[in-house]
């Protein structure tokens, strides 16, 4: 048994989601290799002393830019064949690759794994997290994507992994051409990794009103999230969406403002440690899962909250 | 050249699902079933492309039990021209579905675009489109929020974790839909009536030479851990105190 972690990189570094993948691999108690395919060198020294990590393969190629699946999969495939488990993060990067790899290897990927029960048995949410399925795979290679929020950071204490260059397999598939990217740039922490998240919904009413949320986010060093309704209405960009079909978050504190609490939204945040809801409708379903609910008009309550936080921070 | 739109019949997104007490699965008896919302978006997109004469036919296909015919009629009422029902009882998983769809394309190679949902809201796999693209060796653009027809193919804007990415694809290609691609129309009564006489072809997995046996065995389905309901606080001041006590502020 041997596990290959396919690492995602962000801005020249291994993404935090991939660190959680290594933690998941440590659960399997197999030797772990990591594969990093990028268009510019990545500093992998932080991985070398992680428990169980033996080899770190890096491949740097111009066509690995933008993580286009058709470019990456041939190289991933030629490596994956030597492993019993291949782990991706359940991110837009990992979702694209896991499916293609599964089809090449003729295995059914197991996506969104939240718990590893054994080498062949895994727990994953279905129906927007309203049920948990334990599934067993008889495929020779287990292709998994794991939910980063359900795994800790990896243990250190490794023997010092070797870093080596991969042999790249050229892509023979027909492939898309990159046209452009419009990436959100923000000084705020990443939504998936933030300690505090404050999210706004349709109740905010406009993009302009999101300033009320931004101010508190800046005070708390929080990331900003949103409901689908707020994204659809154009208040905030698409990558703010939290939920079944958006991002999954599990911060220490999640503050939902003007969000009703539809199951699709709740699917993305109900594992948060503490949930606060601010909503003018005392019957809103969000209050059923909130640790602390505040009923009232957000336009009055948010400025008050901001002032109170300023008081706490200066005390 | 026709567009193929695979659709799945799932429990309606408004239904609060119930886990069966014996842990064998989720109750689907006497529950409202609908077309998977992402697949409805896929049908709408394909129909718009036909309305702009970029294609001559929209073909909806489902792999499912006899009752799944209703979602095909629904797709026909939304504007699909004909439908294919691959009759199969029991669970489907992405690999089997992708193989079935690839077999359909092998039979009718004129398809030059497949538009499908990014995710079925029952199993939440988010895999079938990617697997199909690989089996066909076609380029793919997943999580599409915009599709533009160009002389030499399509430009697709994708919703990715960091924002948006636009890719150019030559046809044939696979596209999977995200929520913001379009807002599906409502089927009008005349169109619902018309749908009843549109062609619907049935076939079996055996005829297509595919095996739909699930690769993953479901050992158990259970309720998620419940969050205990919290309290309502009467003021911002109390809220901040509580959060301080909890150590998060
Ligand atoms: C296939 C599918 C996938 C989906 N995926 C997601 C997803 O990933 N994430 C997601 O979020 N949704 C998702 N949805 C949508 C989801 O079903 C809900 O429609 C959405 O979450 C509602 O957003 P909302 O709570 O902001 O809006 P609403 O439900 O309209 O709620 C607005 C809330 O704001 C409150 N409010 C209004 N004004 C004020 C005020 N002045 N002060 C205080 N409170 C106020 C109201 O009382 C209300 O509770 C999905 C839907 C489908 C069909
Ligand atoms: N049984 C099925 N019949 C037809 N299409 C399906 C079926 N299952 C999945 N699909 C298609 O594949 C997409 C993704 O499903 P999944 O990979 O299961 O999340 C769906 O949105 C459908 O377009």
Image (cartoon, rainbow, N blue to C red):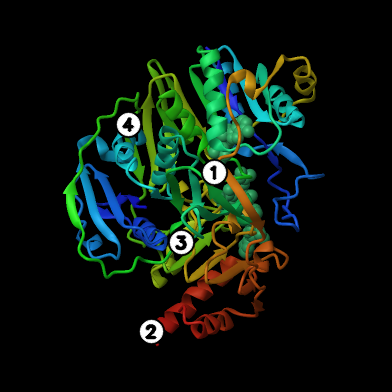
- The residue most toward the right is B30
The residue carrying mark 1 is B125
The residue carrying mark 2 is A314
Which label sits in the foreground, 4 or 2?
4
Element type at mark 1: loop
Residue at image x 51%, y 58%?
A: A114
Which label sits in the foreground, 4 or 1?
1
Label 1, label 2: how far apart the Cα atoms are = 47 Å
Does the residue at mark 3 contact the one at mark 2 (Cβ under 8 Å)?
no
Label 4, label 1: how far apart the Cα atoms are = 28 Å
The residue carrying mark 3 is A149
| Mark toward the start of the polypeptide (3 vs 2) | 3
Chain at tag 3: A
Chain at tag 2: A
Q: 10 Å neighbourhood of mark 4: few (<14), some, or many (≥20)?
A: few
The residue carrying mark 4 is A179
């Amino acid at each position: 048994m041997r596990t290959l972690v396919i690492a995602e990189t962000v801005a020249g570094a291994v993404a935090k989601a991939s660190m959680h993948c290594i933690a998941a691999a440590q659960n399997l108690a197999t030797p772990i290799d990591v594969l990093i395919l990028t268009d510019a060198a990545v500093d992998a020294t932080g991985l070398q002393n992680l428990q169980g990590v033996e080899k770190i393969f890096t491949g740097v190629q111009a066509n690995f830019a933008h993580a286009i699946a058709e470019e990456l999969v041939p190289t991933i495939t030629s490596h994956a064949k030597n492993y019993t488990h291949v782990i991706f993060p359940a991110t837009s990067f990992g979702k694209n690759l896991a499916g293609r790899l599964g089809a090449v290897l003729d295995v059914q990927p197991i996506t969104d794994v939240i718990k590893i029960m054994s080498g062949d048995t895994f727990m994953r949410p279905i129906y927007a997290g309203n049920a948990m399925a334990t599934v067993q795979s008889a495929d020779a290679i287990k292709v998994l994507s794991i939910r980063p929020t359900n795994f800790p950071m990896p243990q250190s204490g490794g023997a010092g992994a070797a870093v080596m260059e991969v042999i790249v397999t050229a892509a023979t598939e027909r492939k898309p051409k990159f046209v452009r990217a419009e990436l959100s740039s923000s000084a705020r922490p990443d939504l998936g990794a933030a300690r505090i998240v404050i999210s706004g919904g349709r109740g905010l009413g406009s993009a302009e009103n999101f300033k009320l949320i931004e101010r508190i986010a800046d005070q708390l060093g929080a990331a900003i999230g949103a409901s689908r309704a707020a994204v659809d209405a154009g208040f905030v960009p698409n990558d703010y969406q939290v939920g079944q079909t958006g991002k999954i978050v599990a911060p220490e504190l999640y503050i939902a403002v003007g969000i009703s609490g539809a199951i699709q939204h709740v699917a993305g945040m109900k594992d948060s440690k503490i949930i606060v809801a601010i909503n003018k409708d005392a019957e809103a379903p969000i209050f059923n899962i909130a640790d602390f609910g505040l009923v009232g008009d957000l336009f009055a309550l948010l400025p008050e909250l901001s002032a109170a936080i300023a008081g706490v921070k200066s005390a | 050249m026709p567009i193929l739109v695979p659709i799945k019949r799932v429990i309606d997104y408004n239904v609060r699902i119930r886990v069966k007490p014996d842990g064998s699965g989720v109750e689907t008896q006497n529950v409202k079933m609908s077309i998977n919302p992402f697949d409805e978006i896929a049908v709408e997109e394909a129909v718009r492309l036909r309305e702009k004469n970029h294609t001559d036919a929209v073909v909806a296909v489902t792999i499912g039990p006899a009752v799944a015919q209703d979602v095909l009629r629904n797709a026909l009422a939304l504007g699909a021209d004909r439908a294919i029902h691959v009759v199969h009882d029991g669970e489907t998983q992405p690999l089997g579905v992708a193989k079935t769809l690839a077999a359909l394309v092998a039979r009718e190679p004129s398809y030059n675009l497949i538009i499908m949902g990014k995710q079925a809201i029952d199993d939440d796999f988010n895999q079938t489109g990617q697997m199909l693209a690989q089996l066909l060796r076609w380029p793919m653009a997943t999580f599409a929020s915009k599709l533009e027809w160009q002389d030499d193919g399509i430009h697709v804007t994708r919703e990715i974790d960091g924002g948006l990415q636009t890719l150019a694809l030559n046809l044939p290609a696979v596209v999977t839909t995200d929520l913001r691609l379009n807002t599906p129309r409502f089927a009008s009564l005349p169109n619902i009536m018309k749908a009843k006489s549109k062609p619907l072809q049935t076939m079996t997995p055996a005829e297509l030479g595919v095996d739909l046996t699930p690769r993953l065995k479901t050992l158990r389905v259970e309720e998620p851990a419940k969050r205990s309901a919290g309290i309502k606080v009467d003021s911002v001041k109390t809220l901040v105190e509580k959060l301080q006590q909890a150590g998060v502020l």
